[in-house]
Amino acid sequence: MHPASFTGLYWSIRGEVACADHAPQIVDPRWAVEGWAPVPVSAGPVQRSRYQCQHCATDGRALVHDPSTLAH
């Protein structure tokens, strides 16, 4: 089980971003050791980017950039 996350995502102090399916359970020692917490609503979108589960993403990235807002 996980604490409530209004974004549906969790992040660690190591910079890993995961959905509820891929984040460690709160009873897993990794939760405390790696400092996992829900990603707050205030964390995104950030500078034309948004967070995503890097385990679900085909490119393995925690941030997805909106190509329509990036300079060419």
Image (tube, grey):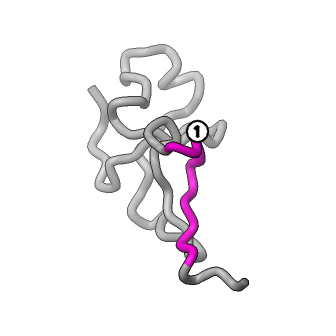
The disc labelled 1 sits on which kind of residue?
Glu
| Label 1 residue SS | loop
Q: Which residue is mark 1?
A: 16
**Count of numbered circles in the view:** 1
Instruction: Tell me the crowding category of disc 1: few under 14, some 14 to 19, or many 20 or more residues within 10 angstroms, Cα based.
Output: some
Q: Which residue is painted at 66% across and 37% down in the image?
A: 14
The correct choice, above or below, for 22 with respect to 70 in the image is: above
Quadrant of the image for the N terminus? top left
Query: Is residue 56 shown left or right of residue 61?
Result: left
Query: Is residue 66 shown left or right of residue 6?
Result: right
The correct choice, above or below, for 57 with respect to 23 in the image is: below
Q: Which residue is painted at 42% across and 57% down in the image?
A: 40
Q: Which residue is painted at 51% across and 43% down in the image?
A: 58
Question: In the rendering, at what x and y percent does residue 55 appear?
Answer: 49, 35
In the rendered image, which quarter is residue 42 located in? bottom left
Instruction: Label the magenta part by its dominant secondary structure.
Output: loop
Question: In the rendering, at what x and y percent does residue 12 appear?
Answer: 56, 37
Along the line of sight, the residue nearer the viewer: 38 or 59: 59
Question: In the rendering, at what x and y percent does residue 17 appear?
Answer: 52, 42
Q: Which residue is painted at 58% across and 45% down in the image?
A: 59
Q: Is residue 36 magenta?
A: no
Q: Is residue 63 magenta?
A: yes
The span picked out in magenta is 58-67
Along the line of sight, the residue nearer the viewer: 35 or 44: 44
Question: In the rendering, at what x and y percent does residue 72 appear?
Answer: 72, 84
